[in-house]
Amino acid sequence: MPDVFIHKLTVPVESIDMNDHVNNLEYLRWMQEIAIQHSSAQGWPIERYIQTGSCWVVRSHFIEYLQPAFLGDSISILTWVAGMKKGSSPRKYLFWRHNDQKVLVAAETLWVFVDLKTGRPRPIPEALQSAFDIVTESEDALLKRVRLSDS
């Protein structure tokens, strides 16, 4: 499933807050980490961005917390590129718990492609655009694919 990048993890103790569930900031951190992992897997590690004098910055996040995650939960984080315009790209995420097959979090980040020196937006190069498939499937259809491949 190259169009959807998946990272599995077990919730560690340092991710737990005073309410005994995963702290909301952890989801943001995991979203950034999986976006970097996905980009690297597609041939665009951080070093390549530095060589081209460019990078991605966040314009906005939307996060819907649906269910809490707890210490020791086995979860999968799914991410995919949902579109690409001249200088920006929405990336979506789902956090899915294995034992009860519940979606914990649905999220989207709007990433803007910028020049490292000026910080100003710049057009996304064709080589970068072609490294990612645009996924337009519904979240339900994606989860069905993941569940089938996990069996």
Image: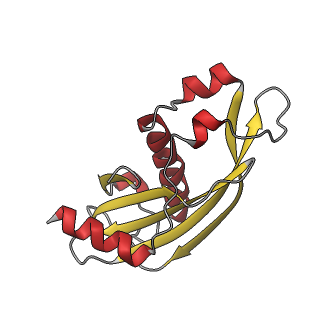
Which residue is located at x 76 percent, y 40 percent?
A: 123
Q: Is residue 106 above or below residue 87?
A: below
Q: How many marks?
A: 0
Image quadrant in which you'd find residue 141: bottom left
Which residue is located at x 41 percent, y 37 percent?
A: 41
Image quarter (top left, top right, bottom left or bottom right) of the C terminus = bottom left
Farthest residue to the left: give it: 151
Q: Please state which of residues 110 and 145 is positioned toward the viewer in this rendering.
A: 145
Which residue is located at x 43 percent, y 74 percent?
A: 139
Q: Please state which of residues 10 and 135 is positioned toward the viewer in this rendering.
A: 135
Question: Percent from the top left, x then y, of residue 74?
Answer: 26, 62
Q: Please state which of residues 135 and 97 is positioned toward the viewer in this rendering.
A: 135
Q: Is residue 16 above or below residue 131?
A: below
Q: Is residue 16 above or below residue 130?
A: below
Image quadrant in which you'd find residue 130: top right
Question: Percent from the top left, x then y, of residue 51?
Answer: 64, 19
Q: Is residue 66 left or right of residue 52?
A: left
Question: Percent from the top left, x then y, of residue 91?
Answer: 57, 57
Q: Is residue 107 left or right of residue 70?
A: right
Q: How is the image coloured?
A: secondary structure
Q: Is residue 81 above or below residue 62?
A: above
Image quarter (top left, top right, bottom left or bottom right) of the N terminus = bottom left
Question: Percent from the top left, x then y, of residue 87?
Answer: 75, 47
Which residue is located at x 39 percent, y 78 percent?
A: 140
